[in-house]
Image (cartoon, rainbow, N blue to C red):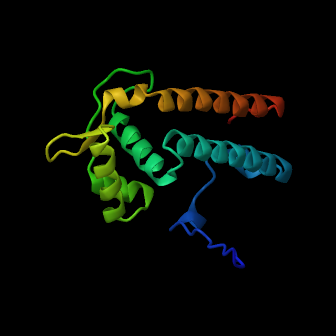
Amino acid sequence: MGNVQSTVVPVVTPGAGNRKPTSDRDETASTDDVAIAARLAGEFFVRGIEIVARAHGGDLLRGIIFTAIAVANSESAPVTGGGERRPVSVMAIAHSIGVPYETTRRYVNLLVGEGLCVRDGRRGVLVADHAFETPEMVAAYRETFASVNRLATALKRINYAPA
């Protein structure tokens, strides 16, 4: 392999400098607390990426698009389950994850072709009910549950209490 150089691109959110902290705790958090929170969040994030990629045969982008569709389908439903899932457009998915429309469209077509997603006419796409019950997805849910519990345990260990 050749020499690979890493480039760090700063992420600039419009108006971020004008944002107020979400709580007094944000302003008074020690540098150590912020560093610990950043490390724990980073570990949780990376575990999530690994879980999503593994559930989708190593294709992270496929997993991200599948997950974005599933989340968008369920946004109007209660977190505790039940409720109606709603279709989402390919354009909305592309915008939500910052992936070009054409790339998203190709992956959605792949997911539809595999039977993991279904089209609802011109309304958009839904994750097929049976897609949540595949062995890969069941394993991903169990791994995610364990990952959330590890994060909660680590936060408890440092006496983290949200404001």
Indicate left or right for 41 with 138 as reference: right
Q: Position of residue 30 (x, y in %)?
A: 83, 50
Of 1 and 133, which appears nearest the observer?
1
Give the mark count.
0
Indicate left or right for 103 with 6 as reference: left
Q: Is residue 155 above or below residue 58?
A: above
**Viewport quadrant of the C terminus:** top right
Indicate left or right for 34 with 13 as reference: right
Q: Which residue is outermost to the front?
A: 1
Which residue is painted at 32% across and 41% down in the image?
Answer: 114
Which residue is painted at 58% across and 68% down in the image?
Answer: 11
Of 11 and 56, which appears nearest the observer?
56
Which residue is painted at 31% across and 64% down in the image?
Answer: 102
Q: Position of residue 124 (x, y in %)?
A: 22, 46
Q: Which residue is outermost to the right?
A: 32
Q: Position of residue 56 (x, y in %)?
A: 48, 43
Which residue is painted at 27% across and 45% down in the image?
Answer: 113
Q: Quadrant of residue 157?
A: top right
Q: Which residue is outermost to the left?
A: 121
**Viewport quadrant of the N terminus:** bottom right
